[in-house]
Image (tube, rainbow, N blue to C red):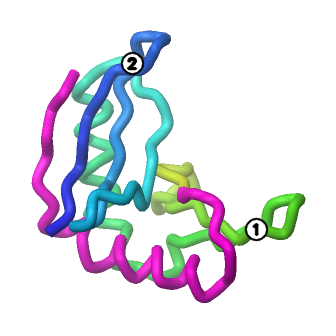
Amino acid sequence: MGKFEINIDKSGKHRFNLKASNGQVILSSQGYESKAGCTNGIDSVRKNSQDDSRFDRKTAKDGSPYFNLTSTNGQIIGNSEMYSSVAAMENGIASIKKNAPDAGVEDNS
């Protein structure tokens, strides 16, 4: 089972990572000023991850596929790593759909 990990970054902002059951980070958030904002971001991932149209599939300048998960208002909730192929990216999206709804939260902040 996956989990969300909340941490504080070097600038003092709260961030979360969604990790798959193997411990690999599959989604990273923006920085939030408060823990409450970060927790709301996690709730938004849980909700929006079940709608495939919320995954904005992209290609980096070097050709690597990646994606952003967006909310209903189009704001980016989280982004993925760079993948080696479109198939690997789609596996990452499938992992988020599977893990996000029931993932626990580990607060390291």
Q: Which amino acid does label 1 sit on?
A: Ser
Q: In which quarter of the image is residue 107?
A: top left
In the image, residue 7 above or below residue 21? above
**Quarter of the image holding residue 88?**
bottom right
Return the x and y of residue 56 as percentages of the image width and height.
62, 69
Mark 2: few, some, or many residues within 10 Å (few <14, many ≥20)? few
- The numbered mark at residue 33 is 2
The answer to whether 63 is drawn above or below residue 51 in the figure is above
Residue 48's x, y, as percent?
37, 67
- Work out how far the residue at label 1 is from the one at label 2, CA to CA, in angstroms: 30 Å
Q: Mark 1 or 2 closer to N-term?
A: 2
Magenta includes 10? no
**Residue, disc 1:** 64
Bounds of the magenta segment: 80-109
Left or right of 27? Residue 64 is right
Residue type at tag 2:
Glu
Instruction: Tell me which residue sits at (49%, 11%) in the image.
Output: 11
Task: Residue lying at the far right in this picture: please name it.
Answer: 61
